[in-house]
Image (tube, rainbow, N blue to C red):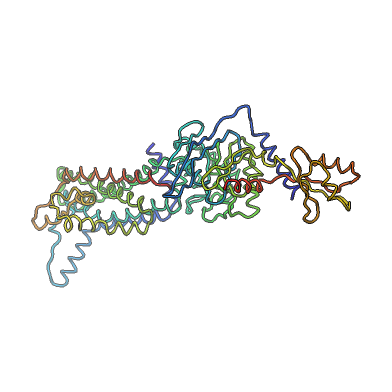
Amino acid sequence: MFIAQRFTKDFSVKLCGSLCNSSNMETVLSTNALTKEFGRLRAVNQLNLEVQAGQVFGMLGPNGSGKTTTLGMLMGVVNPTGGSFTWFGQQPSHHVRKNIGAVLEHPIFYPYMSGQANLEVNAMIKGASKASIDKVLEVVGLADRRGDKYRTYSLGMKQRLAIGSALLNDPKVLILDEPTNGLDPMGIAEIRDIIKKIAADNKTIILASHLLDEVQRVCSHFAVLRKGVLVHSGPIDDVGKGEETVEVIAFHDDLNHILMQFQGTMSVKRTNGPFEVKMREGFSAGDLNKFLFDKGVVVTHLLTQKKSLEKQFLEILAESK
Amino acid sequence: MLLHLLKVDLKKLTNYRTFWIVCGIYFISLALLTASGWEVLKFVGDKVADLGAKVNFSRVPLYHFPDVWQNLIYVAGFFKFVLGVMVIISVTNEFAYRTVRQNVIDGFSRLEFILSKVMTNAVLAGLSTVLLFVIAFITGLIYSPELSFSEMINDIEFFPAYFLQLFGYLSFVLLISIIINRAGLTIIVLMVVRGLELFIMYKALHIPESMAFLFPLESIEALITLPFQRYWFQEVLDHPLITTVLSAITWTFLFNYFAYLKLKKSDI
């Protein structure tokens, strides 16, 4: 599991490396004290967000934290109670929306129409060419089912058609709200592949999800909402900084005692299997390895546990209470 | 621009089987029943004659120019409910499927959404008007004993009035569909609302008949008045009153405007 996590971590770093063109930052989205009240409920509270071009921006938060309401405001279907926002530095208008592809909550189409006909309607609204329909159907792998009625599609196909529709106008920004909700593992993998493909195409992606693993895999930046309030915003790379925990296995009777002697050790815990050494800041697994080797202890297992986004997320939520 | 909006809405509808069925029922029944009225009356007359009574409908110039215009238009007015149901289905579907939301996300403004529906209403009203004109023209040619141009164009102003009546009615249907959002409930409201208006006008407010044209549905209905009393030698109004027309135009505009306001204010 840790190996897998390290691999995906590498991937997200690579992804960011290719996308985060720090020299030419352009603000895609900026919100200023954006607020929405439903009666007495304040669903979104004084939200200030900035999304730069090329970012894959994850929006995290428990159910009901205001993610979809926020995206609804940004896409013009929910009227804000207060505050403002700009897309590409412009005041929001339906013209701006034509250049943003968005899937909010579940896919929405006319069930009695074929996938093709549905995309034709959407292409007309967006002012996209008919040729783009063939292209996006190819991207999302629905070319051979285009003539079938939408209501006969499986959930995974519906999600893919929705992503395809969002891509129609070759938008600079893509908004995906829980794109893998309710999908089976195959469907999730398919959607993730599509997102990676799109991200590699130098598009800005805003991805709302409560699946943290998913966000950590694909996002370069993330923000955390709780009860409509922004409680954290920053790059994903920051996750895992700070103190580390190192797993150690070595065949030595008094390992616990030796580990405690290391000056970089904050605490040692043994659940079952490896010892878990919590390190002081500035010390790494390498320092520990050297120390043990000098003590004549040869380790058979040494692994740095990176802090997962999940852990960090729960910490952020706990701190914000 | 408006044409583009119309194309979008027609694209949604022409792929919808229910649309073809309801519109088919509407246009076919409208055509058949208005065109065959004379034959039906003859048949009834013959049946009554068989029973011993003598009724001669042939002296009643129902299908003669210029009477045929107003007669057929008045009867056609009863069919507009079917068209209203089609509009209700078209609009409430957008809320049931939440496609109005996706349309806006995809780049429609709310005004464009309403206008696309308004354009379809205009097309449906226009098609009905053209169809009725053709039927009245042909049946008039068949049944009129002698044809004179002045008789033929007499009363022809009922056609713009008929268009206004249909368009105004469908605008009202659009408004209540946008407000209520549910097909079944909207159809029920459409069925009872005219009776409710009559009750308010004459039983609750006791307004004089001369003021009736100020009421929304009344102004639409009063565009085409009942023509048949003329056959028992009573005066009939053989042209739409300008006050009624102005009132109907004003209400039609307000229906569409309020529909837009309602959509603009709501979270969809």
Location of residue B55 by image quarter = bottom left
In this rendering, would B139 be left or right of A177?
A: left
Residue sticking out furthest to the top: A23
Q: Position of residue A45 (x, y in %)?
A: 49, 43
Location of residue A132 by image quarter = top right
Q: Position of residue A50 (x, y in %)?
A: 55, 35
Location of residue A78 by image quarter = top left
In this rendering, would A140 be left or right of B230?
A: right
| A271 or B261: nearer the viewer | A271
In this rendering, would A125 be left or right of A164?
A: left
The reply to whether residue B267 is in sight is yes
Name the image quarter holding the N terminus of chain B.
top left
The reply to whether residue B69 is in sight is no
Note whether A111 is above or below A25 in the view shown. Answer: below
| A289 or B20: nearer the viewer | A289
Residue sticking out furthest to the bottom: B51
Q: Position of residue B132 (x, y in %)?
A: 26, 50
Q: Position of residue B61 (x, y in %)?
A: 14, 55
In this rendering, would B263 be left or right of B212?
A: right
Residue displayed at 24% across by 53% down:
B77
Note whether A20 is above or below A1 in the view shown. Answer: above
Numbered marks: total? 0
Residue sticking out furthest to the left: B233
| A159 or B125: nearer the viewer | A159
Residue displayed at 63% across by 30% down:
A21
